[in-house]
Amino acid sequence: MATVAQAAALKARHDSERSVGVAFAIMLAFLVAGPFLLYPVFLMKALCFALFACAFNLLIGYVGLVSFGHALYFGWASYLTAYAAKSWGMQPEIAILIGTATAAALGIVAGIVAIRRQGIYFAMITLALAQMMYLVALRLPLTGGEDGIQAVPRGRLFGLFDLNHEMTMYIFVLVVVLAAFLLIYRIINSPFGEVLKAIRENEPRTISLGYQTDRYKVVAFVLSATLAGLAGSVKALVFQLASLTDVHWTMSGEVLLMTLVGGLGTIFGPVVGAFLIVAMENYLASFGQWVLIIQGAIFVVCVLVFRRGIVGELAHRLHVRL
Amino acid sequence: MFQIFGIPSQALFGQLLLGLINGSFYALLSLGLAVIFGMLNIINFTHGAQYMMGAFAAYLLLQHLGINYWAALVIVPIIVGLTGIIVERLFLQQLQKLDPLYGLLLTFGLALIIEGLFRNYYGSSGLPYGVPDALQGGRNLGFMFLPNYRAWVIGFSLVICFATWFAIERTRLGSYLRAATENPTLVRAFGINVPRMVMLTYGFGVALAALAGVMAAPIYNVSPQMGSDIIIVVFAVVVIGGMGSIMGAIITGFTLGIVEGLTKVFFPEASNTVIFAIMIVVLLVRPAGLFGRGA
């Protein structure tokens, strides 16, 4: 009997690995062919947001923690990268490292404060912390206030590759985002990731099994914040701009929307969601406030009738894990 | 004129008054959030938008129908409260058995829609709403000048806050409400229509937000983003106070308003972040909040 069960489990695991592999191959093919079909800047923007949403999903989808303030890490990393590249003349890889490290540091502080409450309070606390740092960004000379930091030099990667060349920049962004994507996949499927999922399903029981769940939650929070920061740092170089938009609460709402549309707790959902929402915003850019209204409407529709999201629904129909 | 801690008394009391005004709105809004949370287990993210709708409704009634402030004070909470009831019937009711997170997401989406619609039609700039004639001017208290309208706002919001507290903590209807918060199934078994009570509670919470909006219209300009500006601060207020107690929400709201006002006098750079800083300290020292009961 045991061997039959084991074999079934092994087969299920094998199947799910295969479905993930197929989906990854499709995504890779699309992203490699992408710059020949679509504007590279659009793709790079979507890729940055895809990474941002994947980082966010690590927390909401796999630990069940709803952060309403992820713009904090995205935006501040973007500021520090822009500042390091422009005012200190740092090379792009160092500038990105500085931005990402800033996000990690902010994530440690915010994580320790926020995990002291759960559920709905956690969401409100993260939102309030992000708003606080938004107001700081508004006043601090480093951020350039309303103007932001403009004309950030992209520089030469490792002193070798000129990132002002659009295709070089695209390859760089693609490599960074794919590496981070695989890292997140690895985290989710590690023993550490299993504990995170256990916390999501039943925290008291996880505690009773001897896990110090608060530590796991803080680590997951910091990982998520750091990767969100990486996305913000790369974004600063792509657009050569860091601005208040990136730290505003609407940005936190946007990443939540991307993840929700794609599918909470799915591997590919955030990527699909990010591409869809970024595309929608591109097309609706000239319609002003309608973007806000449509975003709100998508939220309402998703919550009422489409809680699995696109990829979640697809995976459910096909009986696979995506 | 005299000085306190090297600060002219006019400036000190002026900021204190402004703090009390802000505190009135914090108290009214966090009160509404607490009432809604108690009954529906939902954080009403639309609260800020409903506050803004209150201010806009007062403005539009005056502009198009010539309905003055005093009538608006009664009519607007009813109208906006009714829209709240519609929202509850159409959307929130369906979320009862789901994770409270979905309530937050849905009301967030609604807030975006409402703010977007108002921005679309009225732009982002503030629209002026005059102080009602009866409350024009002010009086000199010797140590400071007190505008009549501001005195009215503080006094009236105190009355509303305590009336709400009384209704919930001291009346029969309030006791049903508290019982239904604790155990809705049991209360239904006693023949009380709990779903209707939930609906009316949401309507009441929304009406409180709209009332705050009408009162705010002559002080701050009427603008589409006035709601989202204040609601995040109110969230911090709610985290600090904890949502378990009505009186706690009132006291925390007013106190934090005053603290914010005083910070503006002594350390102006920090005035708009001080409430968030206090939230961090409270979370580290007393995670359940000052008046909270557990997580």
Image (cartoon, coloured by chain):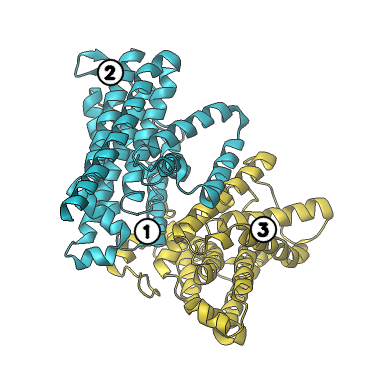
Residue at 40%, 75% (x, y): give it: B291
**Image spot of residue B236 (x, y percent):** 43, 60
Q: Is residue A4 left or right of residue A297?
A: left
Q: Which residue is mark 2?
A: A155
For the C terminus of chain B, the image quarter is: bottom left
Q: Mark 1 is on which residue type?
A: Phe
Upstream in the sequence, badge 2 or badge 1? 1
Disc 1 element: helix
Q: Which SS class for mark 3?
A: helix
Taking depth in this image into account, of A320 and B18 the one nearest to the observer is A320
Chain seen in cyan: A
- Same-chain status of marks 2 and 3: no
Quickly name the residue at label 1.
A122
Question: Which chain is drawn using yellow?
Answer: B
Q: Nearer the viewer, residue B111 or B41?
A: B41
| Image spot of residue B103 (x, y percent) | 50, 58
Q: Identify residue for label 3.
A: B54
Q: Dot 3, crowdedness within 10 Å: few (<14), some or many (≥20)?
A: many
Query: Disc 1: which chain?
Result: A
Q: Position of residue A19 (x, y in %)?
A: 32, 35
